[in-house]
Image (cartoon, rainbow, N blue to C red):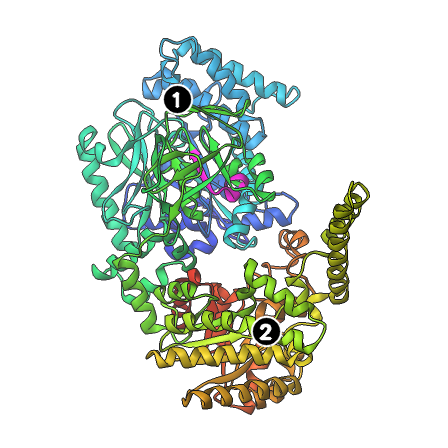
Amino acid sequence: MFENRDHQWVYLFSQGQANMKALLGGKGANVAEMVRVGLPVPPGFTITTEACNAYSAYQRQFPEGMWSQAQAALREVEALTGKQFGDPQNPLLVSVRSGAAISMPGMMDTVLNLGLNDETVEGLATLTGDRRFALDAYRRFISMFANIVIGVGMDKFERTLNRFKAQTKHGRDTDLTPDQLTELIEAYKLIVFSDRHGDEFPQDPYEQLRMAIAAVFDSWNGRRAQDYRRIHRISDELGTAVNVQAMVFGNLGWDSGTGVAFTRNPSTGENQLYGEYLLNAQGEDVVAGIRTPHPIAQLATDMPGVHQQLLTITGQLEKHYQNMQDIEFTIEQGKLWLLQTRTGKRTGAAAVRIAVEMEQERLIDQHTAIMRVEPNQLDQLLHPTVDTSAALTVLTTGLPASPGAAAGRIVFNPDDAEEKAAEGQPIILVRHETSPDDFHGMVVAKAILTARGGMTSHAAVVARGMGTPCVVGAGDLHINAEQGILHVGGHEIRRGDWITVDGSTGQVLLGEVPTKQPELGEHFHTLMGWADQVRRLKVRANADTGPDATTARSFGAEGIGLCRTEHMFFGDERLAIMREMILAEDLASREAALDKLLPIQRQDFVEIFRAMNGLPVTIRLLDPPLHEFLPNFEELQAELFELKLKMQQANSFNEIDQHLRQIWEKERLLRQVERLREANPMLGHRGCRLGLVYPEVTTMQARAIFEAACTAQAEGATVIPEIMIPLVATETELAHQRQLVATVATDVLGAHGMTMAYSIGTMIELPRAALTAGRIAQHADFFSFGTNDLTQTTFGLSRDDSARFLSHYIQAKLLPDDPFQVLDQSGVGELVQIGTSRGRETKPDLKIGICGEHGGEPKSIAFCHRIGIDYVSCSPFRVPIARLAAAQATLAM
């Protein structure tokens, strides 16, 4: 065993185990676990994540003792394999792979066949008896090492390879002769020589190893890895381990191969071995999509003994880890070797099915099943599908790599995708095959389409992880990326044209095709039932119409937590009446307009009460500033200028008279808009302040609510109205508005001869309200924290304007998350906690919820659970996510 000096930076596979992921990374810990249970794993060692972090801290220098420990570990591998690293007669070749504690497939770098040089390639040829194989391995190593470690563009090698392939009969790299491969190797080395300004391709295997380890460490801070961590909210502090492992070769002939297997289908969750393999190939051929692989079931025909062994081992691994496994394997001359196992990435639908079926198979219990599904994955189950009743033109069909359907304008490179998406355009990224360098374009794409690759290709794995619809292996696509043209199915489609990608069926459709919402299946409802039995937090929905309320209820909402009455005033007819009310110059005119609005609002409330029969409905009175209902001031000025120009050009008295009337009306409207303009409208005349200045607005809304409640109750519905006064800063504001609402309620209920349990509360969305919540609670039956505005007023940020710079804060790690997406627990959250505590000091049974966007975000929901909030409210399609997150918050306590 190698000597452990002051600090152990390196562990042999035989020294680790599954619970050491933080130190050895997921790959290193799982490989060590496979060795521990006696599975066939090529020997090797792991350099720890601590070494990676030390390397970054030491200005890209290996920590003291690490290199000597790595050399000692390499000697152990030599002893186990009977080969020597760098020996021209009996060379040991190794792979160098990354392996973070949290799986980041395809985001960091791997080097295969390391240790080959002009001498060892001859030894490999002698050992294997296959000179062509040895030369092919060497040319692969040169291009891979040069690209990943040195930074030479892979396109230079591909162009050279294509030139050589064109000289063969079938145009394939497998047709290259040993002489051609020898010539190709020299061409590759010349590319490196030119790119390195005269430096030769490194021939010393130990120098190769040092450089490769450093490259893997560096890849932790590469753009694609940083982007992946940002999207998936993975800490930058984890670092990556480096796994150095003896090579086994899947390209030693047609009795060799390589593949990827999942113990269950990662797209559907079906309990059946799933995966792909290639004979006479190396691992990157499968994941890079260079060749389209065979389904794993075909291995039973090609190599029945290996297939049976694979079935046995994969079943053993799933039972051992009690989770679906993603396994990489190599077959070397008929012998099966396992290179790694890890918890498999899966779609939302697959995650739900696997969790439920594993519980039914008694592999896990219900609580584990609930914790197995990432709440945000449920969003994928709600993705739209193609409406098959529409007229469809199928361009081609590929492999359905990631479910869901999306339409968009096609682009052919990731930079264009990023640029067009930033402009607000829906984008479909079309590639021959994707690579990790495409990640920034894949993240913003509505869907991904590739001409090559299989279900375990880079595009497929990354898309499934993000929940992005994806079709791969669409071999009929003829892509000319430089000209921005795609030919398929007799159609020519240019950059910017619309197509629709159906990741559930593999179909690629011409144009923008209508979609429809999916139906949720038995497994979903089973999991949600388990979650509902566990969770303490109630989940309501934000809904402003009867149809929205019906949708919310179908997803399991336990009431309406926020009905925004201002949304009911949009639409041409309603907006015209609303403007009439706003522009009224006296009380009588304003009340006349309000009388027109009342029946409209009343009917909207009736529909919501019917839909939520028996469940509470929280209705927020008018909140936004009035100018939002009026035309834009600058646009009005431009229109007035145009009218004056037209009047100057008029040729008759009638035209002049008509233009003068229009100008007078426009000037009147402009004066009113100018009168209502505010320098900072979000902190201006809005919310309860409107009701204080114009109490008739509050009175009209309250009357509409209670008249609707009486109508719905008369029809047999159980109505539970909760009236919420917005933007309260002082207890006197709430007391004033509460009295108005209560007076109307008494009048309406008395006139209808009805009784009804109703409540009046307030929205806590200002820091002062949170700090004085004890006094405000004297006049409130409930609190609902409006965390959107509370975040704005706490940070001093405009939600509308901060998007242009908040991304910099996140990238520079000045903030861990966008505070409008994930609740800022140490600042805004502290105010929520203070408001909750002080409110309940006054009224111990005070009902408290939150109704901002944070109500559907899992980390924010966990915080709400911890501080004792009663319910969260979110958009209807986030309700299932909130239900599961609330259950997980309970189980995590």
- Numbered-mark total: 2
* Three-letter code for the amino acid on which mark 2 is drawn: Leu
Q: Which residue is mark 1?
A: 490
Pair 2/1: label in front: 2
* Three-letter code for the amino acid on which mark 1 is drawn: Gly
Q: Is residue 322 visible?
A: no
Residue 558, quarter of the rendered image: bottom left
Report x, y in % for residue 778. 58, 91
Q: Residue at x 68, y 53 (%)?
A: 805
Looking at this view, is 246 or 676 the one in front? 676
| Stretch of the chain drawn in magenta | 440-449
Q: Residue at x 78, y 40 (%)?
A: 651
Looking at this view, is 18 or 246 the one in front? 18
Is there CB contact under 8 Å for labels 2 and 1? Answer: no
Badge 2 crowding class, 10 Å Cα cut-off, few under 14, some 14 to 19, many 20 or more, is many
Q: Which residue is mark 2?
A: 594
Report x, y in % for residue 870. 46, 78
